[in-house]
């Protein structure tokens, strides 16, 4: 019998790359001199390239990025290495979305570093104006360097820019005057408010969503939340109003309703403080606390409001978000 042959491979259609075209730099660098590998790595970092595999780096395709890779390939060749530049689309192993995520992760790390340094400078005791302006100018330059290699618009840029803007305002005007002391909040026992109906204005947004979550989380898990028109409503027996005109719990001084409820019923809970600061910054739009999470939480709440016209549904979706945020802030750091 003739020797059996293995079956030929089944022909497969190539999947067309979608979305992005990429440039790849594939290199081989001699082991000596030692500094060459470090020099090439630093050069690629300055271009904003990301590593796809060992010795394979990617950039989005474009005239400038092509020229950048060609210069690196030429430098490697001068030092007796080998490098090729090619245009590619990913078919298997990596998707466009995964490659984009690699770029976002790299730039977000840079933006977080800039934002963290700006926050540290913002929080430290005021320095001499000349020294503060020097630090600010250095951070602006660093931010500009990151933006220049942010080829795919990483989401961390906005937070870094807000931190730089806040620091710039601090340098120009000095530390803000301390907030005037607001009215004192009298602690209350949740048990005194069990079995009540909590009433608020319909078409709920951030402060009412967060406040309703707090009511059910810290005051009465079985509380009924009732939504009524903004004006003309007359409360009924055993109803408690919040975040509306003449309510038992509403804005007080410079505090939003959520802050008032938190200070009244759960002032000793440290995980509620960052939540209250986020809600304050979104609701009052005064950037008092400069919470970097505020923009993201605000965008999520905007999405809930846009997709849910029913207030009860908004409350359900918002409550899940605040459950997760509360768990995050209450988690013990390792």
Image (tube, grey):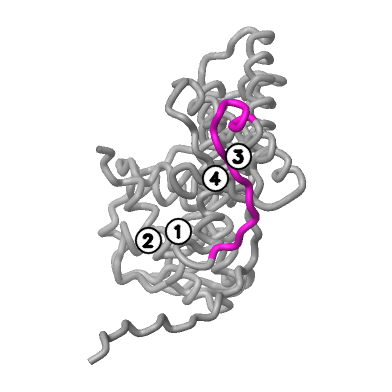
Say few, some or many: other residues with alpha carbon within 10 Å of mark 3 (under 14 / 14 to 19 / 20 or more).
Answer: many
Which is nearer the N-term, disc 2 or disc 4? 4
In the image, residue 43 lies in the stretch drawn in magenta: no
Residue labelled with disc 3: 48
Please identify, in this view, whether the residue under mark 2 or under mark 4 is nearer the observer.
4
- Most extreme residue toward the bottom is 1
Quadrant (top left, top right, bottom left, bottom right) of the N terminus = bottom left
Residue labelled with disc 2: 215
Measure the C-alpha gap from mark 2 to mark 3: 47 Å
Tag 2 and tag 1, C-beta contact below 8 Å: yes
Measure the C-alpha gap from mark 3 to mark 4: 16 Å
Which span is picked out in magenta? 75-90
**With respect to residue 288, does 59 lie above or below?**
below
Q: At which x and y percent is residue 307?
A: 58, 74
Residue labelled with disc 1: 211
Which is nearer the N-term, disc 3 or disc 4? 4
């Amino acid at each position: 019998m003739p020797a059996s042959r293995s079956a030929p491979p089944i022909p497969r259609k190539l999947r067309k790359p979608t979305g992005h075209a990429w440039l790849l730099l594939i290199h081989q660098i001699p082991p000596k001199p030692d500094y060459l590998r470090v020099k090439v790595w630093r050069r690629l970092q300055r271009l904003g390239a990301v590593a796809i595999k060992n010795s394979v780096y990617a950039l989005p395709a474009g005239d400038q990025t092509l020229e950048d890779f060609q210069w690196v390939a030429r430098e490697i060749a001068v030092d007796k290495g080998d490098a090729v530049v090619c245009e590619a689309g990913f078919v298997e192993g990596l998707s466009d979305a995964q490659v984009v995520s690699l770029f976002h992760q790299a730039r977000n790390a840079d933006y977080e570093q800039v934002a963290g340094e700006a926050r540290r400078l913002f929080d430290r005791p005021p320095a001499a104006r000349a020294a503060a302006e020097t630090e600010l100018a250095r951070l602006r330059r660093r931010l500009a360097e990151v933006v220049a290699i942010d080829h795919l618009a990483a989401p961390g840029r906005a937070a870094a820019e807000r931190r730089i803007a806040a620091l710039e305002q601090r340098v120009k005007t000095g530390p803000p005057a301390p907030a005037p002391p607001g009215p004192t909040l009298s602690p209350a026992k949740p048990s005194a408010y069990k079995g009540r109906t909590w009433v608020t204005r319909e078409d709920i947004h951030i402060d009412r969503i967060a406040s309703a979550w707090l009511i059910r989380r810290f005051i009465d898990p079985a509380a009924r939340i009732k939504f009524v028109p903004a004006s003309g409503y007359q409360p009924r027996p055993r109803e408690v109003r919040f975040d509306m005109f003449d309510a038992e719990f509403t804005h007080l001084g410079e505090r939003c309703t959520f802050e008032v409820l938190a200070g009244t019923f759960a002032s000793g809970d440290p995980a509620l403080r960052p939540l209250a600061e986020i809600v304050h910054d979104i609701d009052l739009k005064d950037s008092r606390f400069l919470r970097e999470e505020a923009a993201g939480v605000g965008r999520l709440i905007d999405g809930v409001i846009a997709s849910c016209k029913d207030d009860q549904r908004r409350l359900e979706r918002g409550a899940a978000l605040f459950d997760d945020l509360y768990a995050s802030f209450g988690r013990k750091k390792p």
